Amino acid sequence: MRAAVVVFPGSNCDRDMVEALRQSGADVAKVWHKDAELPTGLDLVAIPGGFSFGDYLRCGAIAAQSPICRAVVDHATRGGYVLGVCNGFQVLSETGLVPGALMRNSGLKFLCKTVGLTVETQDSAFTAGYSLGSEIQVPIAHHDGNYYATEDELRALEGEDRVAFRYSDNPNGSMSSIAGVLSANRRVLGMMPHPERAMDAQMGSADGQALFRALVEQTTLA
Amino acid sequence: MKAIVTVMLKNGVLDPQGEAVKSALGGLGFSGVNSVRQGKVIELDLAEGTDPAVIDEMCNRLLVNAVIESYQLDIT
């Protein structure tokens, strides 16, 4: 499986993302935000966490207009896989690849802690490695993770089984406790928690492994 | 010419920052503050004769996230 990790000015989880993908068997390249093209033959593009462009204007808004993001949208439109974590989720929501928006946490505080997530669907390459309804432990680290979507968008997400993860104990005011959502074709996942920070028991949790392993396995078979 | 874009969260979208400001005003002893909404103002210095439709396009493509925000455009 061939993957690329996008790096913006202000990305700070790119190295962890590369490491998590490599440990899971992917062949990983980094791409810079000014690149207008992705490497050929890619299966997955991962957009890591951080503070792209200093969170200016809105989190992810400037990054979503960068040259590489146009290539990422094309990749997704062709049916390619895209994973956006934390700031990556904010970027994906700003490109429109996943619905909704991420607003300031309802408690106004930056939250940095490990939280419980319920796996809401197995029907995606990202979540096929988990049991339905199981609770996994994954860290969050964000100031703007309060998921908002319109009524129509929420109805579509729920009706089409596109909520990937929900918080067991809603930390940030997200609608319907949503922590991660899938695109209509189920090949784009945006999530606020950091599975790449849960790759080893020594990191506090190894529950992120199943996401990357399933993703590499499914996309390699495809 | 100048264009002032006032961006506000849409009605019905919870504004936690506005709520915090309201609570702080209450803490200072100001009574009768029914609600506070916080937004932002973006000032654009533009070439004379810029088509307002182009400014709307700037708002829709970058300056405003239509999922959660609405805007008002004032051209001077």
Image: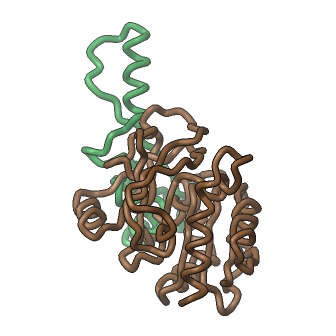
Chain colours: A brown, B green
Number of on-image labels: 0
Residue B66 relative to residue A135: left or right: left
Q: Residue drawn 54% across and 81% down? A: A218
One can see residue B76 in this view: no
Name the residue located 37 percent from the left edge and 72 percent from the top edge: B53
For the residue pair A170 and B50, the one nearer the viewer reads as: A170
Report which quarter residue A11 is drawn in.
Answer: bottom right
Q: Position of residue A192 (x, y in %)?
A: 52, 53
**Residue appearing at x 74%, y 73% in the figure:** A32
Q: Is residue A151 visible?
A: yes
Question: A73 above or below A94?
Answer: below
| Residue B68 spot, x, y in % from top left | 35, 53
Residue A13 figure quarter:
bottom right
Q: Nearer the viewer, residue A158 or A202?
A: A202
| Foreground pick, A118 / B36 | A118
Q: Position of residue A188 (x, y in %)?
A: 48, 73
Q: Quadrant of the N terminus of chain A?
A: bottom right
Residue B32 in percent (x, y) is at 26, 15
Which residue is found at the position 64% from the left and 54% from the top?
A206
Nearest the eye: A23 or B16: A23
